Image: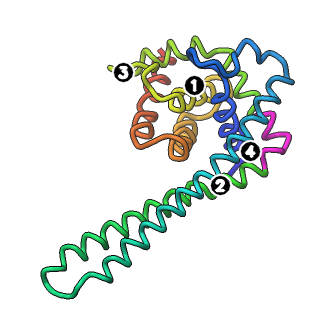
């Protein structure tokens, strides 16, 4: 994982600590100084540590359930009438095992991110990206909202809004190619959002880029 990718992920976690639309955490007006941004960065690192523990706990739980399903399939009585139950237990066990492995795979980079977050280049990149989003958030939200196609930005989960804002800043202020920005945004959605968020992000960013060119 390159330093820019690390910075983007830390910036996303930093944005999650800032007041967005009514809930009082830390208002963007309070973040003008480098000291305030450093405080925000420390909060993001603490949030990441919690996320690592939760992801590993979820993976362990999925693996335990998968093991139990596979054990239940072995304990079923022999006979043709028991085959559907055995098959159902096997399928559920394998699905849980795949889910656990996918979750674990997505979490393997998190401890590394936590360690590398203290590198100066990573920290500075995260602060610069978070500041850029906060400084231009109102304008970004208006322009992203215009390309939502039947949906509203305000109705998206907070994490999806921040992923889109961050990707838009990458495109406009950091000169990141569209393909890279989309790929990085989807990767962040893989780790922090859900399937609906992943499907939505690519289309929104492409429409946003096309609208910007007009």
Query: What is the number of the mark on residue 151?
Result: 3
Compared with 60, 27 (above or below) is: above
Name which residue lies at 54% across and 34% down.
Answer: 178
Q: What secondary structure is the magenta-colored segment mainly?
A: helix
- Lower sequence index among marks 2 and 3: 2
Q: CA distance from mark 1 to mark 4?
A: 19 Å
Q: Which residue is mark 1?
A: 165
Q: Do the CB atoms of the residues marked 3 and 4 lie less than 8 Å apart?
A: no
C-alpha distance separating marks 2 and 1: 23 Å
Q: How is the image coloured?
A: rainbow
Q: Residues within 10 Å of mark 3 (few under 14, many from 20)?
A: few
Please report the bounds of the magenta region as a residue range: 116-125
Question: Which element is circle 4 on?
Answer: helix
Between the residue at mark 4 and the residue at mark 2, the CA separation in whole angstroms equals: 13 Å
Q: Is residue 89 left or right of residue 115?
A: left
Nearer-N-terminus badge (2/1):
2
Determine which of the numbered discs, if any, sits on residue 81 in the image: none
Residue at 78% in and 44% down: 117
Element at label 2: helix
Q: How far across and how far down the image is residue 203, in percent? A: 41, 32
Between residues 1 and 127, which one lies in front from this camera angle?
127
**Is 132 situated left or right of 96 in this image?**
right
Residue beneath label 4, please?
3
Residue 109 is tagged as 2
């Amino acid at each position: 994982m390159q330093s820019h990718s690390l910075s983007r992920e830390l910036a996303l976690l930093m944005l999650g600590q800032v007041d967005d639309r009514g809930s009082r955490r830390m208002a963007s007006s309070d973040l003008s100084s480098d000291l305030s941004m450093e405080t925000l960065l420390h909060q993001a690192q603490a949030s990441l540590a919690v996320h690592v523990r939760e992801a590993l706990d979820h993976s362990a739980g999925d693996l335990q359930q998968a093991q139990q399903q596979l054990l239940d399939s072995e304990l079923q009585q022999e006979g043709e009438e028991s085959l559907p139950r055995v098959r159902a237990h096997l399928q559920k066990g394998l699905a849980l095992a795949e889910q656990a492995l996918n979750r674990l795979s997505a979490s393997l980079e998190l401890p590394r991110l936590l360690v590398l977050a203290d590198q100066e280049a990573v920290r500075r990149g995260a602060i610069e990206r978070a500041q850029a989003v906060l400084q231009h958030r109102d304008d970004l939200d208006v322009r992203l909202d215009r390309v939502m196609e039947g949906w509203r930005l305000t109705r998206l989960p907070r994490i999806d809004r921040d992923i889109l804002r961050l990707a838009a800043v990458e495109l406009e202020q950091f000169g990141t190619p569209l393909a890279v920005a989309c790929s990085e945004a989807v990767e962040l959605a893989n780790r922090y959002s859900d399937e609906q968020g992943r499907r939505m992000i690519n289309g929104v960013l492409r429409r946003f880029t096309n609208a910007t060119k007009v």
